[in-house]
Amino acid sequence: QVQLAESGGGLVQSGDSLRLLCAASGRRLPMGWFRQAPGKEREFVAGILWTDNNTRYADSVKGRFTISRDNVKNTVYLQMNNLKPEDTAVYYCAAASVGLGTVAAAYDYWGQGTQVTVSS
């Protein structure tokens, strides 16, 4: 069993930065960050493994967002720089039983989400 809890969301202005945290407990599985804006499907943002430096990013966030993890604290981070209004969404942390995929259906465990709002 895996439990996930996100934190760090908030209201910022365009160009600002935020760091999201995902505290994880239980099995160490491939981890991903997803986001869902109103009226849109949940989309992959970034993913990371606990065991090596393999990471994946959506094209829309490459160069602006960085995913990392702290194996001692069992925490996954999403550093978001140069935020844009289109980054506004609820951000979810997720864990997948198999593989570091980019599809929400491949992830079995989800946090409750944290709201990120970027004003122009």
Image: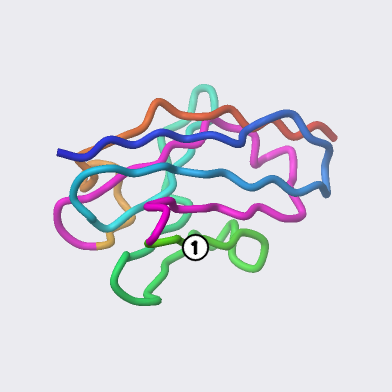
- The x and y percentages for residue 34 are 43, 43
Placement of the N terminus among the 4 image quadrants: top left
Magenta residues, as a range? Answer: 72-99
Whether residue 79 is in magenta: the answer is: yes
- The x and y percentages for residue 61 are 59, 58
Q: From what the image shows, is residue 8 above or below residue 112?
A: below
Q: Residue at x 77, y 54 (%)?
A: 82
> Residue most toward the front?
72
Q: From what the image shows, is residue 82 above or below residue 37?
A: below
Q: From what the image shows, is residue 8 above or below residue 77?
A: above
Q: Within the image, what quadrant is residue 81 found in? A: bottom right
Left or right of 2 in this view: 39: right
Q: Nearer the viewer, residue 95 or 89?
A: 95
Q: Residue at x 40, y 33 (%)?
A: 5
Left or right of 92 in this view: 2: left
* Label 1 packing within 10 angstroms: few (<14), some (14-19), many (20+): some
Q: Nearer the viewer, residue 41 or 119?
A: 119
What color scheme is it? rainbow
Placement of the C terminus among the 4 image quadrants: top right
**Which residue matches tag 1?**
68
Q: Within the image, what quadrant is residue 112 found in? A: top left
Q: Nearer the viewer, residue 102 or 71?
A: 71
Q: SS of the residue at dot 1?
A: strand
Numbered-mark total: 1
Q: Residue at x 58, y 27 (%)?
A: 115
Q: Nearer the viewer, residue 84 or 20?
A: 20
- The x and y percentages for residue 44 are 42, 49
> Residue most toward the bottom?
53
Q: Residue at x 41, y 36 (%)?
A: 42
Name the residue type under label 1.
Answer: Ser
Whether residue 112 is in magenta: the answer is: no
